[in-house]
Image (cartoon, helix red, strand yellow):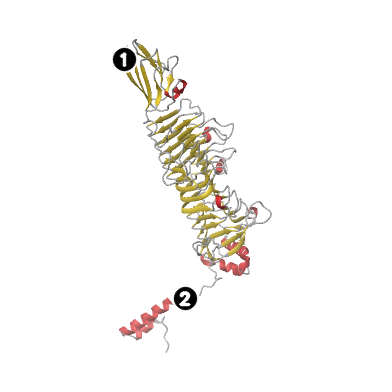
Amino acid sequence: MIIGVNDVTSVLSIWRSPIDRVAVAEAESLQRRQPQCTIVYGEDFTQITMYNYGQYITAAGGIANADAALDLMFGAMNPSTLYGFYGGLAYITQQEFSVNAYDPILKKHEVPDQCNILGAGTGGSKANGMSTPFYHFTITPMATGSSISQFLTCEGNHTTGGKWFRGLSFKWLQTNAKAGDICISAGTWNCRAIDCTFTDCPTAFYAIGESAGLEQCLINYTTGSPNDAVAVYLQGPQAYVVGPSEYLQDSVASGGPTGCTAIALGGGGGAGNLVHGVISTIHLSNWSYAINYNVNPGVNGTHITNVQAQAYATCVNMQPPSVSNNQINGEKYTGCTFEKAPNSVMSTAIVFIDTNGGGNNTINDIEFTDCSVYSQAGFPAGGYCYQISSGSNIRIIGGTASNAGNGLVTAGIAITTTAISGGPPGPGRITVLGVDLNSSYPQTGGGPSAYALFVSANLQDVVTIDNCRMTNYSASPIYITGTVNNYLYIRNCEGYNDRNTSILSGTSSLPITSPVSAATASSLTGGTDYYGPSLVVFTNNASSNTFTINGTISQTVPAHGFVTLYLASPYDTIQFGHTLSAFSWIGK
């Protein structure tokens, strides 16, 4: 008689020995550990909403038909009369597939709704001695036809569940590649790439849909990639990029592509504006532009935190394109580091704010909090850490703006005229609080700033510089060539307000014929314009004397009287009735 291990009940009813019970239990345990089925390369898991790319490779006639297999798989994941399923999990084996990108109008590889495309093995470019790189998809762009090619398309009807790409690696072949080519066009809600790598993909991810974005992905441009490309577009509402992540390209100075942008912000205007976007915990390296507002118009309320960017030209290019509805409002940068690349030869500002010919309200409510901005480049002349040409309600709070670079006029903060004719002659309200504007930044290769503050614009509203450090400048840390229009205030700044700057001294030139303020003291012989509080000290002559403050408050000083007068504003005026015995006006 032969008894199977499944006949446990009958066995135990005959064998009562404890040893027999142990033997049967061991037999059952051994049976459970044995493989119950065999999974082959082309196994069909469709009925449990899992899709094996290998199955469709086999159905399409082999790996040479990877494009057809991809479309077969996406077709099976769409609602089906056979199973009625929507989307599911697609499994991409650890294998390299050569595929093609097509004209976007064709929507050749259209990804179905509610899908999760999962790669086995992370792939990516070779590094640390690896001889053979591995990519799930090596993508050939079109040689002719449309100006751009597109690989994966996420459009059409959708639920809030989204379309997710996980652990996949993409390699865009450089032959015939164009700056506008797109790897993933994310046009639906919650379309996301997670833990993916993109090598030489001109646009790795085009986030058009609501809450579309990238998480912990790597993007890399190598020498030979197209110039003027944009790696990531954040265009739809709540679009985002979060890390930890690295987006990098080969250095421009070493032959890398020129004019490229890591992340472009802007929704296209109107209802399609980028609102409430997020960029967080990411390193952007060697791009011409790290964060660029000059590609698409319409940005509102982006929060950018813990970004470390090194740019060949400009880290933050906050200048909208010259089109209608080009508003930039409510942008908040917190805890970021922005650095000019050490091999740069460009004199562009590290952070540039300009309305591109629009009114100052075109850019409004902009804030940089605890950000470090400096240059490692030794060459550029005329460089600035922050350059503000137009815009309004701009706040720089805490952080550092130092080491702007070699040159006669380099500055931590520069307030200049608008870059485009027809715009305002200068920006609106600017507030700078608690910023380290020291000439040099530690451990950098670039040159020190020539000035802490440079103003060449005709100011249109109040500019307040308060509690900032302006040290290590041999001469005055500020340089003014524009017209301040009674709008510039510098208070409590080490290296400026503590220098006891002589505004005017001696009795040979006194404000007698007309009132003079500290800010206009250079109108008198030997006078120096000063933009902070000041102290007036004088001794009257043998006759009684009168002086007038702000044209309305008159006081009489007796003969030989000694007066010490504190003027809180650089625009408080003073005028004397006649000459004095001694006079000194000191900046505080």
Instruction: Check the picture and name the quadrant holding the N terminus.
Output: bottom left
The outermost residue toward the bottom is 1
Disc assigned to residue 36: 2
Tag 2: Cα neighbours inside 10 Å, few (<14), some, or many (≥20)?
Answer: few
Q: Please provide percent x and percent y for residue 7.
A: 40, 82
The residue tagged with tag 2: helix, strand or loop? loop
Of residue 113 and residue 425, the one placed in the foreground of this image is 425
Question: Mark 1 = which residue?
Answer: 561
The residue tagged with tag 1: helix, strand or loop? loop
Identify the amino acid type marked 1.
Gly
Q: CA distance from mark 1 to mark 2?
A: 109 Å
Figure quadrant of residue 469: top left
Of residue 247 and residue 581, the one placed in the foreground of this image is 581
Q: Please provide percent x and percent y for residue 149.
A: 63, 54
Task: State whether residue 520 is above or below residue 395.
Answer: above
Disc assigned to residue 147: none
Task: State whether residue 430 is above or below residue 579.
Answer: below
Total tally of numbered discs in the picture: 2
Identify the amino acid type marked 2.
Gln
- Would you say 466 lies left or right of 247 here? left
Q: Please provide percent x and percent y for residue 486.
A: 46, 25
Q: Please provide percent x and percent y for residue 566.
A: 35, 23
Figure quadrant of residue 298: top right
Residue 114 in sight here: no
Residue 335 in sight here: yes
Tag 1: Cα neighbours inside 10 Å, few (<14), some, or many (≥20)?
Answer: some
- Would you say 107 lies left or right of 353 here? right
